[in-house]
Image (spheres, rainbow, N blue to C red):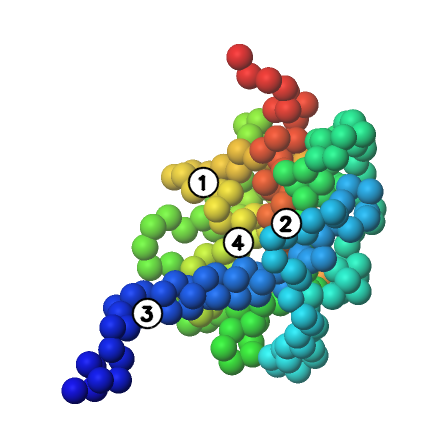
Amino acid sequence: MVGVTFFGDFDLASAAIWLFWIFFAGLVIYLQTENMREGYPLRADDDEPPANESLWPVPGAKTFHLRDGRGTLTVPSREYEDSKMRTDLALAASSAASGSPWIPTGDPMIDGVGPASWAPRRDAPELDAHGHAKIKPMATLSEFHVSAGRDPRGKAVVGGDGEVVGRVIDMWIDVPEQMVRYLTVDLNPEGSGKTRLIPMNMAKIGSDRVTVRSLHAHNWDNVPTTKKADEVTVLEEDKIMAYYGGGTLYAAPSRSQPVI
């Protein structure tokens, strides 16, 4: 018999479990190194390479061909990380110790730091599977309509301080997902065209108003805008979301104080 004459006393079950553990360890190492293709090489607070980036070495550079003719991307790459690094951060270190908190030195919501920070993403719209912009104003989509729930269009927009700041005039739809991503608010009640986008997850639609608690009346003028009236890029999305998110802490001085 093959099992007796060829293998002898060799334990096939033990070999199988050891082969599994070796494969599993290799898989963990592979996934961990592949996870280091973005955000690496790391930087210390003094902009020098840290003493130990990871238990595993940074993987070798790999070039990816981007879809829809958007060129190539090589990662990890110090040149790529340098090109994405923001050098205008209005922050000051709270102490000389590495890892200490950084304190905003200006208006953190406008400067985009702390909870209002954003990443320098590609200044181009996110595309669907057919190469078209995913997010579009509902006014340009004749095939879309509100089938359930409250239609926010025409409702007043109220900030966290209770002040009316404008009126909703449109919704922005994620076409392939068929979801509302943004609301368009006209900040002038007479319809002057001074509009801003409101992230849908930062708005609460009531029977007679849309409430955005993260911003106060004096914050709305500085909400980041879009270059095109019917298109929003991923960079613009990041800045808009960061501004509203930062308002939760920075919209008013009282919000950044301890609560007892």
Q: The residue tagged with tag 3: helix, strand or loop?
A: helix
Kindly report the distance in space between the C-alpha atoms of the residues bearing marks 3 and 4.
57 Å
| Residue 165: image location, x then y, percent | 60, 37
Q: Earlier in the sequence, mark 1 or mark 4?
A: 4
Q: Nearer the viewer, mark 3 or mark 1?
A: 3
Mark 3 = which residue? 15
Query: Label 1: which residue?
Result: 204
Q: Amino acid at mark 2?
A: Ile
Is the residue marked by circle 1 packed among few (<14), some (14-19), or many (20+) residues within 10 Å? some
Question: Would you call the spot at circle 3 few (<14 residues within 10 Å), some (14-19), or many (20 or more)?
Answer: few
Mark 1 vs 2, N-terminal side: 1
Residue 84 vs residue 145, the one in the foreground: 84
Q: In this figure, which residue is indicated by the disc labeled 2?
A: 240
Q: Is residue 186 visible?
A: no
Of marks 2 and 3, the one in the foreground: 3
Judge depth for marks 3 and 4 and give the one in front: 3
Residue 107 location, quadrant? top right
Going from N to C along the chain, the mark reached first, 3 or 1, is 3
In depth, the one of 182 and 123 nearer the eye is: 123
